[in-house]
Image (tube, rainbow, N blue to C red):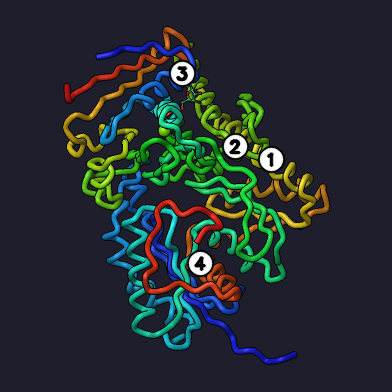
Amino acid sequence: MEERKDTLILGIETSCDETAAAVVKNGREILSNVISSQIDTHTLYGGVVPEIASRKHIERINQVVREALAQSGTELCGLSAIGVTYGPGLVGPLLVGVSFAKALSFASGVKLVGVHHIEGHIAANYIEDPNLEPPFLCLVVSGGHTHLVNVRDYGEYEILGRTMDDAAGEAFDKVARAIGLGYPGGPKIDVAAKAGNPEAVHFPRAKVAENAYDFSFSGLKSAVLNYLNSCQMKGEEYNQADVAASFQAAVVDVLTEHSIRAVRETGAKTFALAGGVASNSALRESLEKACAGLGVRFCVPQPVLCTDNGAMIAAAAYFELQKGAESGLDLNAIPNLKLGER
Amino acid sequence: MIVFESHSDEDTFRFASKMGREAVPGTVISLTGDLGCGKTVFSKGFASGLGVTEPVSSPTFTILQQYESGRLVLYHFDVYRIGDPEEMEETGYEDCFYGNGVTLVEWAERIRELLPEGTILVRIEKDLEKGMDYRRITVENTGG
Ligand SMILES: Nc1ncnc2c1ncn2[C@@H]1O[C@H](COP(=O)(O)OP(=O)(O)O)[C@@H](O)[C@H]1O
Ligand SMILES: [Mg+2]
């Protein structure tokens, strides 16, 4: 086999709460992965997520990128490219990453590659499973996104279904708040549910009439609130763990059912999970089991690659670069960026 | 001031859709009401009245979602995650509030001081005595 030079990519992610940077080799191997999270400050506020300030990103980005380069033993000039999230997200936080990446690229002459945040989440699976190649189906579930995606090829995406109202992670956060579990809702409900009975309360598994792959979680949120209200009106105490478990079961059922339907109808051989909610233990278990039952390969990144991170952005940038996609120094933050668009 | 009694999410959707059909450039609407009251249902109805064809989902996490397929550009905010009005700078909100599109703001009470003069105040309230699906929607025109 012909010897090839390794492709080292620096990935930068600032689209939401995390300031993150990483160096990844050949799109698959992590050399460093530095994440500076704002989650500790958030939990102080008991459920409210107050700090959306790009100020925090600005304070941290230089240090985070230096760390990522140092830990990987890479010099800026040894990089093949700098990948950066340029959407979707809030313009303020996005601009911090994009401007920083552009400045680095300009100063060093290293290529720049703009990356879609969700494509990054999907690409986390290329790191987790070095043999994973398209085509495969991917369920991306996070605080802001719920997408069932057919990954036809590297960088080629077809959205099969999406949420019509609340994202899966958002539903977790809102229900956690309603039952007094606080922020972040996903992990809190995951833990609480382990002590509860998932069949204690039957919450609806919402269907969307127009498209069997679409999701709706707002009705489920209402059902939980109505249940809590009716307990209150009857002067009854509700069981927090049971509500958490029953709610989680409803979310997991719907996500699994739609995913399996898509696997069946597309004949996919591989199914991947991605995004922050992919860390939910009940969801991982349910999808793993369902895939095993169909003889379909199941892939899910380890939790550190499910949350926002720079490694997934570097991985996505690698495959973009392979296709010759490169961004100019006029790269801008695009808050409304759609999947598969450039 | 208008008070509308809604008995279902469709009622709320239709009521909001009518407001969407009549909305003029520069309109800013403040939407207040507890979790699960129907602020997003209202927004979906309003968007449909404007002629927005894309699916309108909750912007709780993204804070701002922009839709361009309607008669006017729609800026859909959810400022629940905004702790301090100063953080609104992150969203570039001034271009939306003072532009030629229309703006909906869920949880607008959190950024009251930033709302422009003439903001239309929409309050959605439950009344459990009247059933789980009952909502009282109050619309107040502050600009006159
Ligand atoms: N009369 C009503 N108007 C609006 N929504 C209603 C009504 N009755 C029941 N609902 C339900 O309440 C929920 C409102 O959710 P949503 O619009 O996301 O609330 P919010 O954005 O205020 O948190 C939906 O599931 C909707 O179907
Ligand atoms: Mg809402």
Q: Whole-Å distance between the Cαs marked 3 and 2? A: 25 Å
Q: Earlier in the sequence, mark 4 or mark 2?
A: 2
SS for tag 3?
A: helix
Q: Amino acid at mark 4?
A: Ile
Q: Nearer the viewer, residue A200 or A71?
A: A71
Asked if residue A92 can be seen in this view, the reply is: yes
Q: Position of residue A63 (x, y in %)?
A: 34, 73
Q: For the point 47% across and 72% down, which residue is it?
A: A113
Horizontal side of residue B54 vs A261, given as left or right: left
Residue type at numbered disc 1: His
- Residue B3 sits in quarter: top left
Q: Is residue A236 visible?
A: no
Q: Indicate which disc residue A229 carries.
A: 3
N-terminal label among 3 and 1: 3
Q: x and y percent of residue A128 in the render?
A: 64, 66
Judged from the image, the secondary structure of the residue bearing numbered disc 2 is: loop
- State the residue in front, B88 or B45: B45
Mark sitting earlier along the chain (3/2): 2
Question: Would you say the residues marked 2 and 1 are in contact, meaning their CB atoms lie under 8 Å apart?
Answer: yes
Spatial distance from mark 3 to mark 1, Cα to Cα? 30 Å
> How busy is the neighbourhood of tag 2: few (under 14 within 10 Å), some, or many (20 plus)?
many
Q: Are marks 4 and 1 on the same chain?
A: yes
Residue pictured at 62% horizontal, 26% vertical: A204
Question: To which residue does mark 2 refer?
Answer: A215
Dot 4 falls on a residue whose secondary structure is helix
Q: Residue A78, percent across and down?
A: 47, 88
